[in-house]
C-alpha cells in the first residue's frame, strides 16, 4: 500500500470525489456506486 500524505484538510465527500479519478487510472476494473441524499449538503 502506498504512503499517503495529507495535502490539506477536506471534507470526506470532497476527498472521496478527488480520489475517484486516481483510482480509475490505477484500476480500470473499478465500479463506483453512489447514492444521493436530499438532506446532504456540501
Image (spheres, rainbow, N blue to C red):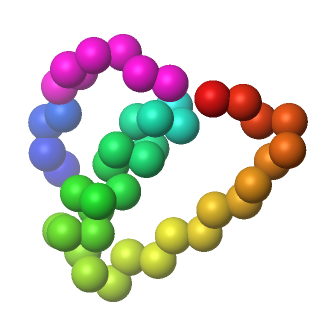
In the displayed structure image, the side of residue 11 where residue 8 appears, left or right: left
Rendered image quadrant of residue 36: bottom right
Q: Main secondary structure of the magenta part?
A: loop
Q: Is residue 2 above or below residue 15?
A: below
Q: Nearer the viewer, residue 42 or 34?
A: 42
Q: Is residue 16 above or below residue 30?
A: above
How many numbered discs, if any?
A: 0
Q: Horizontal and vertical percent for residue 1?
A: 18, 50
Residue visible at 26% across and 81% down?
Answer: 28
Instruction: Specify the segment rendered in magenta.
Output: 5-11
Q: Give the position of the C terminus as an image quadrant.
A: top right
- List the single residue furthest toward the bottom: 29
- List the single residue furthest toward the right: 39
- List the single residue furthest toward the left: 3
Residue visible at 46% across and 35% down?
Answer: 14
Q: Nearer the viewer, residue 39 or 4?
A: 39
Rendered image quadrant of residue 29: bottom left
Residue visible at 28% across and 69% down?
Answer: 24
Residue visible at 13% across and 36% down?
Answer: 3
In the displayed structure image, the side of residue 23 where residue 36 appears, left or right: right
Q: Horizontal and vertical percent for residue 16?
A: 44, 44
Q: Is residue 15 above or below residue 34?
A: above
Q: Horizontal and vertical percent for residue 22?
A: 23, 57
Residue 16 is one of the magenta-drawn residues: no
Residue 6 is one of the magenta-drawn residues: yes
Rendered image quadrant of residue 39: top right
Amino acid at each position: 500500500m502506498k504512503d499517503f500524505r495529507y495535502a490539506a484538510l477536506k471534507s470526506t465527500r470532497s476527498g472521496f470525489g478527488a480520489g475517484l479519478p486516481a483510482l480509475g487510472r490505477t484500476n480500470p476494473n473499478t465500479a463506483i456506486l453512489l447514492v444521493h441524499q436530499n438532506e446532504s449538503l456540501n
